[in-house]
Image (tube, rainbow, N blue to C red):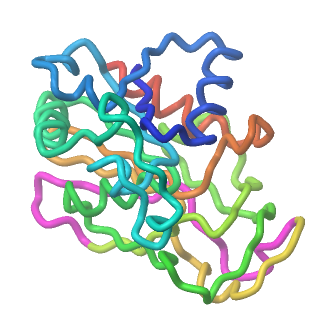
Amino acid sequence: VALYQNWVHKMQEGWTRFVFDEFKIDYETLQPKDFQKKDILKKYDVIVFIGAGKTEIESGKPPKKWEKWFTPQPPEYSGGIEEKGKKALEEFLKTGKTLIFIADSCEYAIEQFKVPVEDVIGESQKVRCPGSYLEVEIKESELTLGMKPKAAVYYDRAPVFDTSLPNSIAQDRRTPVVFGRRDLLLSGYLEGEEHLVRKSLVVDFTSEGGRIILIGPDIIFRAQSEGTYKLLFNALFTAAR
């Protein structure tokens, strides 16, 4: 297992390290400079990206809306995985390996790997949910092993997906976690529920042997959302084939 760590450290990545350490999951940290090394990814079965947005992964820069508050880092702590890193990830997938993208990192996967999904939330203000527990429906899947038909998910305007048919017969996509039809709020505040109804929170996409798992919400939120840890743990275990 490898866990991506951006130079501008993301709190979600730190909490993921905490959870991995707590549950004794053996992992290594990958930083942007590592993607410039030859064959660096060969020893891994799965790489996890969490929290870092598309531009942060690509170039190390924040999204444009935050640029004016961004202080440039020293050269040795600047940059992203760049084009060489993207190509390394493409080769990683071609060998049948697994990439997991959680929260804001999903944007990078959707754009760079042409996953047939759309984040229906994005920058939209149609949904207001400042950190609440919402009820979701759980389908049978190797990613949901051990989970009951309903679950509580911590949600804070995270990516939510509308899926479309794959581009070829060599591709497949499954949606093991979806919102129900009504009364999603379990605890907290939610406005704009109608925009979440029947949308997917997790997409399991395979293409020519490689696998990309998109998980919209922060399912380990500050090491508190133990009910959804299984989604990440199952993703790790099933990557070791």
On screen, residue 112 above or below 101: below
Give the side of residue 195 with respect to residue 77, left or right: right
The residue that appears at 56% across and 29% down in the rendered structure is 233
Q: Which residue sits at x=37%, y=61%?
A: 107
Q: State the quadrant of the C terminus.
A: top left
Residue in view at x 46 percent, y 23 percent: 237
- Is residue 185 inside the magenta stretch? yes
| Residue at 17% from the left image edge and 31% from the top image edge | 92
Residue 91 falls left or right of residue 224: left
Vertical side of 187 occupied by 210: above or below: above
Percent from the top left, x then y, of residue 161?
45, 69
Q: Relative to the observer, which residue lies in front, 71 or 135? A: 71
Residue 209, percent across and down?
17, 37
The image shows residue 196 at horizontal and vertical percentages of 61, 79
Give the quarter of the image for residue 30.
top left
| Magenta-span inclusion, residue 224 | no
The quadrant holding residue 227 is top right
Q: Which quarter of the rendered picture does the N terminus lie within?
A: top left
Image: magenta residue range: 165-186
| Residue sitting farthest toward the right | 187
**Relative side of 11 to 226, left or right:** left
Up-down relation of residue 63 to residue 73 (above or below): below
